[in-house]
Amino acid sequence: MVQAAVRLSEERNERGSGGRRRTPEPRYLVVGEIIGAHGLLGELKVELHTDDPNRFRQFDQLFLGQEEEEPVARALKGFRLHKGRALLQIEGCTD
């Protein structure tokens, strides 16, 4: 299963004397699962895992990868809705 995710950052304070701040820890929010190709021009069909599919319009990039792997950043070039799913155009995916 290949997932599309966006990166979130979170800072946590350590308790105790000194009160050091840890560096932000990258986290990912899964917003969809790539379930196949759509057409011949490289669009990816995505099963949505978000209650607001229009949030894709806010993203410049997505992080793609298998569940157990480190995600790879890809520029989001296009987005549209089709039959309850998202169709995405991702940098480097042309056919």
Image (cartoon, rainbow, N blue to C red):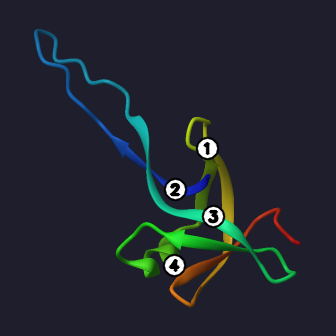
- Seen at 59% across and 71% down, the residue is 46
Labels 4 & 1 near each other (Cβ < 8 A): no
Camera-side mark, 4 or 2: 2
Query: Horizontal placement of 43 versus 53: left or right?
Result: right
Disc number for residue 19? none
Label 3 and label 2: CA atoms lie apart by 11 Å
Of pointers 1 and 2, the one earlier in the residue sequence: 2
**11 or 66, nearer to the observer:** 66
Residue matched to label 1: 71
Disc number for residue 5? 2
Camera-side mark, 3 or 1: 3
- Seen at 16% across and 18% down, the residue is 19
Disc number for residue 34? 3
Residue type at numbered disc 3 = Ile
| Element under disc 4 | helix
| Element under disc 3 | strand
Labels 1 & 2 near each other (Cβ < 8 A): yes
Of pointers 3 and 2, the one earlier in the residue sequence: 2
Label 4 and label 1: CA atoms lie apart by 20 Å
Q: As displayed, is residue 21 above or below residue 34?
A: above
Point out residue 79 in the picture as x, y percentages from the top left corner: 61, 81
Residue type at numbered disc 2 = Ala
| Element under disc 2 | strand
- Seen at 24% across and 31% down, the residue is 12
- Quadrant of the image containing the C terminus: bottom right
